[in-house]
Image (cartoon, rainbow, N blue to C red):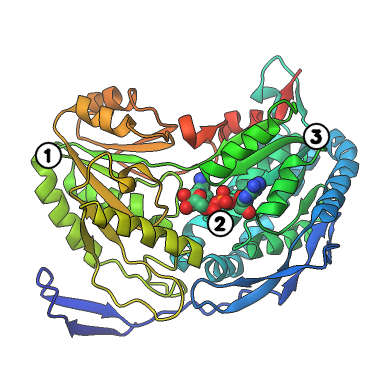
Amino acid sequence: MAIKKKRVARELLFGDLWEFDPAPETAPAFIADRYGLFINGEFVAPKSKKWIDSISPRDEKKISEIALAGQADVNAAYAAAARAFPAWSKLPGAERGKYLYRLARLLQDRAREFAVAETIDGGKPIREARDFDVPMAAAHFFYHAGWADKLEYAAPGRDLKALGVVGQVIPWNFPLLMLAWKLAPALALGNTVVLKPAETTSVTALKFAELIRDVGLPKGVVNIVTGAGETGAAVVKHPTAAKIAFTGSTGVGKWIQRELAGTGKRLTLELGGKGANIVFEDAAIDQAVEGIINGIFFNQGHVCCAGSRLLVQESIEVEVLRKLKLRMKSLRTGDPLDKNTDIGAINSKRQWERITELVDAGVSEGAEIYQNDCTLPKKGFYFPPTLLCGVTQSHRVVKEEIFGPVLSVLTFRTPDEAVEKANNTAYGLSAGVWTDKGSKYLAVASQLKAGVVWGNSFNKFDPASPFGGFKESGFGREGGRQGLLEYGELV
Ligand code: NAD
């Protein structure tokens, strides 16, 4: 690969800056011009006769048209799922497992195509779609395929029965991976599904419907309806649903909880977060800086468990910030299809506006802003990696989820102060603790009110590890044995 050496005057710290030539991923994504709804094993035109454009945040170009499902379409999807339920739930677990294995294998076969489609549709760097989203999605199907014929070990001494038809609504930050998190455990247990992807990122779910068709999954076991909030509300409120599983914003999650109160439907909510990444003075600083970068800039910061509040011990603040800024200079923000890109496009104009509004609010409340001095593409939605220093716990940017590449920096003096500040949030999804001392890690982690606490690492995931939150981050777990139990009834 050709590498050009460029002298950039502002790069005082680096002296010389090495620039990579563009390295675009060129594999075709095979995105259809138009996708119908996937109901009863086939793509059908919406009864609503409405369609919406799906655009790429990379360059704002239209990439496809997706159906806008109305109430009649959602009814049809639930009817198909209800018809499919008796046979699917009675199938021996080993047989259901075979379908899940086939889905995982077929996804692996077409991994490159799915990664490119995910990047074009959602804006995430191809490096992440290729190395994280698609392999992890396949891993969830493999993992749950393994459970399907071993359910008696998930609840020893008890019988685990499928719930019925499950309604699932997923967000736009990990479209394919969230589909896998939702579908795999539901199907392993014998439930049938009506799934609604996010309106800005439906393409890979609809491409996945092709795999569902190709593996010969019985008709109606998985139905995919596309559309925006109204379609989601119709999925949530449908009387046929035995359970709703939702991942998205806390506001919508609260509305769903109110809506479902008294209906007897089961509910799991995976909502927002404002994770604290705590760095103690005895930590390996260079390693911690990598963890801070990964914690906030992975997937443009569109991560519910992002480490969006850095809590750094006062004695090392200067050193950590110096190293962090230096490391940030090497991050490449731009075309997500470029294999060298670290930070791709913000998922939508609406999300870009929300990030901009919150950062402006932070600055007007007195935050010192540090941003990478990078050239952003003219078309598409891009936001440079950003630090907000000199903030306090009352700043909006410290309290509210920004869901973008923006890190708020706070300091602390003692472990008790770190714990108090980390827990001073409405959320409770994730945290990270960086220290050389195992005893300090255990003492601090056990006091943090967060569903996951990483030690000397951040944003590590495994299908066998349950994930979920406390407080306004929601309830219920996804992944592992605990996640499986959310889709069954113990009898
Ligand atoms: P959202 O909650 O509105 O959307 C998530 C999903 O819910 C989408 O599929 C959407 O169509 C659907 N939805 C919207 N209204 C609904 C309703 N009334 N009933 C049922 N489904 C409904 O999220 P957003 O507006 O796209 O993003 C706003 C903020 O939410 C972000 O800035 C971020 O802070 C947060 N968010 C969190 C996650 C997460 O993984 N926890 C994911 C996406 C967004």
Q: Position of residue 171 (x, y in %)?
A: 58, 52
Nearest the eye: 481 or 352: 352
Closer to the N terminus: mark 1 or mark 2? 2
Is residue 367 toward the left or the right of residue 54 in the image?
A: left
Give the quadrant of the C terminus.
top right
Dots 1, 2 in contact, CB < 8 A: no
User: Residue 48 appears in which quarter of the rendering?
Assistant: bottom right
Question: Is ligand 1 closer than 8 angstroms to the Cβ of mark 2?
Answer: yes
Give residue 314's mark. Answer: 1
**Category of crowding for the residue at label 3, using alpha-carbon neighbours closer than 10 angstroms: few (below 14), some (14–19), many (at least 20):** many
Secondary-structure class at tag 2 = loop
Frontmost residue, 369 versus 208:
369
Q: CA distance from mark 1 to mark 2?
A: 37 Å
For image coordinates 12% across by 80% down, the residue present is 9
Residue 133, x across and y down, in percent: 52, 56
Rendered view: 2 above or below 147 = below
Give the residue number, with chain letter if any, for mark 3: 164
Q: Position of residue 104 (x, y in %)?
A: 66, 53
Dot 1: what SS? Answer: helix
Image x and y of residue 434, in percent: 25, 38
Q: Residue at x 52, y 68 (%)?
A: 119
Kindly identify the amino acid type of the residue bearing the numbered disc 2.
Answer: Trp
Q: Which residue position is annotated with label 2?
A: 172
